[in-house]
């Protein structure tokens, strides 16, 4: 089963394709779609949509996992912008007939690290260990990996990594 995890962000959208089965889990592909800070919102959203659509077409995942929307009272503008990004992410999935599974942030942290209040660095260490990723990875890609792993766990797939070849870097970064 292939799951695409997506960490929506206007500046940087992380993605990771993870495969799970009876032999465990392995990372197929990961990357970050980056947009220019000064570009108009519509152009940035189109860029994210187009790049994510290419990932969906190339990998054909069974499901896409994204973090549930949450809003910080102190930063309402950020929540609104993330809603825009999450909307184009969901649109890209719908256009390819891929089911979208929203996941609560605490459930993601619990699934990969064993603690619902885990820090970003704890989540990153956990996904690196579970997926046997050598070296540093982008925090955005790590969050996307954690979402994909959580969706696999919820589908009944054990989160252990078999001895397989390492993941490849993405062909294009948006």
Image (cartoon, rainbow, N blue to C red):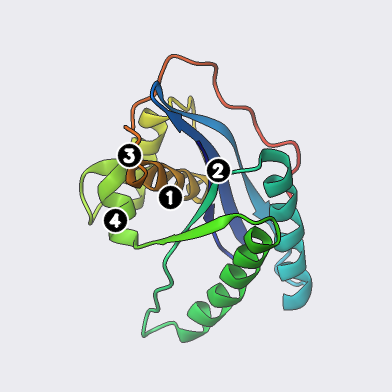
Mark 3 and mark 4: Cα distance apart in space: 15 Å
Question: Quick one: label 3 or label 4, which is nearer the N terminus?
Answer: 4
Residue at 49% over, 16% down: 164
> Callout 3: 10 Å neighbours few (<14), some, many (20+)?
few
Instruction: Give the class, few, some or many, for how many residues have Cα within 10 Å of label 2's Cα (few <14, many ≥20).
Output: many
Question: Horizontal and vertical percent for residue 27?
Answer: 52, 31
Query: How many numbered discs sit on the rendered protein?
Result: 4
Q: Earlier in the sequence, mark 4 or mark 2?
A: 2
**Residue assigned mark 3:** 156
Q: Position of residue 71 (x, y in %)?
A: 40, 79
Asked whether disc 2 touches disc 1, contact meaning CB atoms under 8 Å apart, the reply is yes
- Residue 96 in view in this figure: yes
Above or below, 7 relative to 42: above
Nearest the viewer among 36 and 10 is 10
The residue tagged 2 is 16
Local secondary structure at mark 2: strand
């Amino acid at each position: 089963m292939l799951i695409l995890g997506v960490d929506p962000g206007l500046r940087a959208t992380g993605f990771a394709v993870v495969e799970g089965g009876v032999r465990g889990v392995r990372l197929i592909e990961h990357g970050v779609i980056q947009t220019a800070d000064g570009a108009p919102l519509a152009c940035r959203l189109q860029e994210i949509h187009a790049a994510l659509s290419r990932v969906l077409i190339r990998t054909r995942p069974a499901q896409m996992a994204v973090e549930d929307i949450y809003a910080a009272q102190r930063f309402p503008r950020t929540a609104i912008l993330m809603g825009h990004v999450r909307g184009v992410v969901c649109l890209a999935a719908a256009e390819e007939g891929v089911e979208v599974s929203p996941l609560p942030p605490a459930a993601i942290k619990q699934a990969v690290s064993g603690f619902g209040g885990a820090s970003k660095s704890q989540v990153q260490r956990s996904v690196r260990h579970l997926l046997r990723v050598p070296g540093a990875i982008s925090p955005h890609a790590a969050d996307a990996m954690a979402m994909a792993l959580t969706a696999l766990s919820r589908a009944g797939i054990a989160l252990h990594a078999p001895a397989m070849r390492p993941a490849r870097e993405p062909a294009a970064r948006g």
